[in-house]
Image: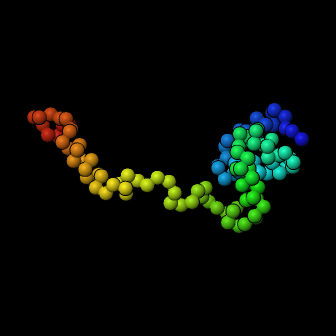
């Protein structure tokens, strides 16, 4: 029921090469192959959270076309907003500060 150390090493290497979505599904498939206790065993081998594996199993069971044909890993529009969008006029203010505090040659304005 348990894999050899050589196989577990190969599994870990392969697991690390996958995207987040594919890792979840691979761990779920391996856990389902083992049956009872599979989630705990695969969780220890791959250092994956049990909830992640359970989510992968749920995705595999849903068999939705949307689940398997997604090209993006995360939803569009997520992540941190740019500083420019949060602070309007930031670029102009920054360039003004640079203009005041930039050192150069007093004899030649081209040299900064």
Check the image and report above or below for 66 versus 98: below
Q: Is residue 107 visible?
A: yes
Which residue occupies the foreground of this view, 44 or 100? 44
Instruction: Provide residue 11's location: percent of width, then percent of height.
Output: 76, 40
Instruction: Please tell me which residue is depicted at 20% across the width and 44% down the height of the picture.
Output: 99
Instruction: Give the number of marks.
Output: 0
Which residue occupies the foreground of this view, 91 or 37? 37
Extreme residue toward the left, this view: 107
Extreme residue toward the right, this view: 1
Instruction: Please tell me which residue is depicted at 84% across the width and 34% down the height of the picture.
Output: 4
Residue 14, picture quadrant: top right
Check the image and report above or below for 78 versus 39: below
Instruction: Provide residue 8's location: percent of width, then percent of height.
Output: 79, 37
Q: Is residue 26 visible?
A: no
Instruction: Provide residue 94's location: percent of width, then percent of height.
Output: 27, 47
Instruction: Please tell me which residue is depicted at 18% across the width and 42% down the height of the picture.
Output: 100
- Left or right of 40 on screen, residue 88: left
Check the image and report above or below for 99 versus 63: above
Instruction: Please tell me which residue is depicted at 52% across the width and 57% down the height of the picture.
Output: 78
Instruction: Provide residue 22's location: percent of width, then percent of height.
Output: 69, 51
Extreme residue toward the bottom, this view: 65
């Amino acid at each position: 029921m348990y894999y050899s150390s050589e196989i577990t090493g190969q599994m870990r290497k392969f697991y690390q090469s996958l995207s987040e979505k594919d890792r979840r599904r691979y761990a779920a498939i391996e856990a389902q192959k083992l049956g009872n206790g599979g989630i705990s065993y695969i969780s220890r081998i791959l250092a994956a959270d049990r909830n992640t594996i359970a989510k992968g199993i749920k995705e595999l069971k849903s068999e939705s076309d949307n689940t398997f044909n997604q090209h993006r890993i995360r939803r569009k529009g997520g992540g941190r907003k740019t500083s420019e969008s949060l602070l309007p006029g930031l670029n102009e203010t920054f360039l003004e500060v640079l203009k005041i505090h930039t050192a150069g040659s007093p004899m030649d304005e081209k040299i900064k």
